[in-house]
């Protein structure tokens, strides 16, 4: 609900999907037209170290990935990164071909370095500027 509310306040009307909706959590309608955008939200309490990941399934169907890092460890504030699917796919790590699952992932403590331009990107800017640039998605 937090991501949907912040997107709406940024000028992109959004609504949370029902609990357990497959593949995505929020639907958002760009105000300049175009199809509704599907947003998958992944939230974690922030931790440092090698066993703390944000993951998503490669088969899930969504247009944007919202990563919400809740306060924890030495991170005192909530941080949110909203990333186009294509960029999430290109910047995340992927399970090897012999893995039993097919997931993409980041270590929590490396998201800030990997996706800095997409922090607080509630307007769905494909360049991650955080400002509405006439092109969404």
Image (cartoon, helix red, strand yellow):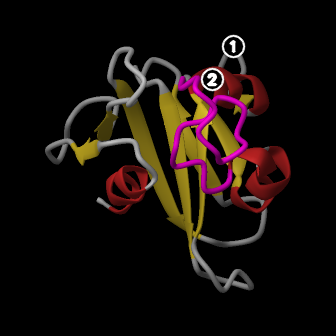
Q: Position of residue 8 (x, y in %)?
A: 35, 51
Q: Residue at x 39, y 58 (%)?
A: 9
- What is the quadrant of residue 28 in the picture? top left
**Residue 36 versus residue 65: which sits nearer the camera?**
36
Q: Position of residue 37 (x, y in %)?
A: 38, 26
User: The magenta stretch spans which residues?
Assistant: 119-137
Q: Is residue 74 left or right of residue 120?
A: right
Screen quadrant of the C terminus: top right
Distance from disc 1 to disc 2, alpha carbons, whole Å, reads 6 Å
Q: Residue at x 74, y 52 (%)?
A: 111
Q: Is residue 4 left or right of residue 101?
A: left
Q: Position of residue 89 (x, y in %)?
A: 67, 24
Q: Which residue is mark 1?
A: 97
Is 130 covered by the magenta stretch? Answer: yes
Q: Which residue is mark 2?
A: 99
Q: Main secondary structure of the magenta part?
A: loop
Image disc number at residue 129: none
Q: Residue at x 65, y 39 (%)?
A: 105
């Amino acid at each position: 609900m937090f991501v949907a509310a912040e997107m709406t306040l940024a000028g992109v009307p959004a609504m949370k999907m029902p609990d357990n909706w497959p593949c995505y959590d929020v639907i958002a309608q760009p105000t300049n037209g175009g199809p509704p955008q599907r947003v998958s939200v992944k939230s974690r309490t922030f931790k440092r170290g090698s066993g703390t990941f944000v993951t998503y399934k490669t088969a899930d169907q969504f247009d944007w990935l919202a990563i919400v890092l809740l306060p924890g460890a030495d991170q005192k504030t909530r941080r949110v990164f909203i990333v186009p699917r294509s960029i999430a796919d290109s910047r995340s790590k992927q399970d090897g071909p012999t893995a039993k699952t097919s997931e993409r992932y980041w270590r929590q403590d490396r998201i800030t370095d990997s996706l800095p331009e997409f922090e607080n990107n509630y307007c769905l800017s494909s360049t991650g500027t955080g400002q509405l640039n006439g092109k969404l998605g």
